[in-house]
Image: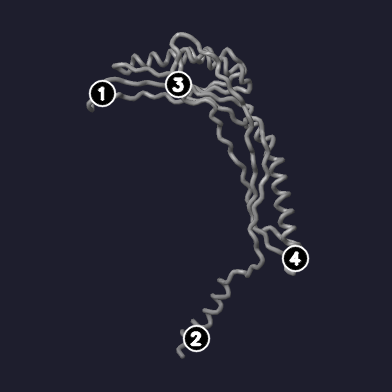
């Protein structure tokens, strides 16, 4: 046998041993969660101003004036948070030729005082259109519940793991891996499309809205390894 053949035969077993992963037994995947109903405490609305014209300047000026008016109305209410959103200017085509321009801009309003915001929306509909209104759980409310939900979900996870270990005749377990996930609640649309058209030069009645509740949850997914018997 040539020397290099002998060296290769000696190296191969060592390589195989080095690449071997430690053997694992009695590993179990588990998932648990905790859920709570939380009051939707934040009302959010988006409205937009839109105008069309033969050239871009005229509708742009009209939209700017409408949004400036809406901002002035909203700033009268300390309980309402205001944010301006996207500004769009798009050509309108007819027979592949530009025959006009459509300009629009949106604003976002939110408040913990739904009655104040509902009245303001009714006023703004004199000149703006509503794209959506919805309730959601505020960040403050959500954070307040997440810690308790996490504690509850972890307690359920460990209790279930201990129960499985006992049932299968093992003295205990260890956690191999663990992940914690919390739901990101989406805004709940209460009114969409039912108030799209502006009412001309007069305000409309305030929309009737019910906040309701939303489920918040924290889920735990992990893997445990049972202690040897």
Label 3 or label 4, whichever lies nearer to me, is 3
**Chain-order first, disc 3 or disc 2:** 2
Which disc number belongs to residue 196?
3
Say few, some or many: other residues with alpha carbon within 10 Å of mark 3 (under 14 / 14 to 19 / 20 or more): some
Secondary element at image label 1: strand
Q: Are marks 3 and 1 in contact (CB under 8 Å)?
A: no
Say which element carries label 2: helix
Q: Earlier in the sequence, mark 1 or mark 2?
A: 2
State the CA–CA distance, disc 3 to disc 4.
Answer: 64 Å
- The residue carrying mark 2 is 6
Mark 2–mark 4 CB contact (< 8 Å): no
- Which of pointers 3 and 1 indicates the residue nearer the eye? 3
- Location of the C terminus (image quadrant): bottom right
Which residue is denoted by mark 1 in the rendering? Answer: 98
Q: Nearer the viewer, residue 42 or 16?
A: 42
Classify mark 2: residues with Cα within 10 Å, few (<14), some (14-19) or many (20+). Answer: few
Which label number is shown at residue 170?
4
Residue sitting farthest toward the top: 201
10 Å neighbourhood of mark 4: few (<14), some, or many (≥20)? some
For the residues labelled 1 and 2, the Cα–Cα distance comes to: 82 Å
**Colour logic:** one colour
Say which label, 4 or 1, has the lower sequence index: 1
Of the two numbered discs 2 and 4 on the same chain, state the one appearing first in sequence.
2
In front of the other: label 3 or label 2?
3
| Gap between marks 4 and 1 measured at Cα | 77 Å
Front position in the image: 168 or 16: 168
């Amino acid at each position: 046998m040539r020397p290099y053949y002998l060296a290769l035969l000696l190296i191969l077993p060592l390589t195989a041993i080095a690449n071997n992963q430690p053997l694992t037994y009695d590993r179990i995947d588990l998932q648990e969660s905790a859920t709570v109903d939380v009051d939707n405490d934040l009302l959010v609305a988006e409205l937009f101003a839109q105008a069309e014209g033969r050239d871009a300047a005229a509708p742009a000026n009209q939209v700017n004036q409408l949004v400036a008016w809406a901002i002035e109305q909203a700033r009268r209410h300390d309980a309402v948070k205001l944010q301006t959103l996207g500004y769009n200017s798009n050509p309108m085509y007819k027979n592949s030729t530009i025959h006009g321009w459509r300009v629009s801009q949106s604003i976002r309003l939110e408040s913990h005082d739904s009655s104040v915001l509902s009245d303001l929306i009714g006023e703004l509909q004199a000149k703006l259109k509503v794209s959506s209104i919805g309730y959601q759980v505020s960040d403050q409310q959500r954070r307040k519940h997440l810690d308790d939900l996490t504690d509850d979900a972890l307690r359920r996870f460990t209790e279930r793991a201990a129960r499985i270990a006992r049932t299968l005749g093992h003295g205990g377990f260890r956690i191999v891996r663990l992940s914690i996930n919390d739901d990101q609640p989406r805004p709940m649309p209460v009114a969409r499309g039912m108030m799209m058209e502006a009412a001309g030069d007069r305000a409309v009645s305030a929309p009737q809205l019910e906040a309701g509740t939303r489920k918040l949850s924290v889920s735990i997914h992990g893997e445990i390894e049972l202690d040897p018997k």
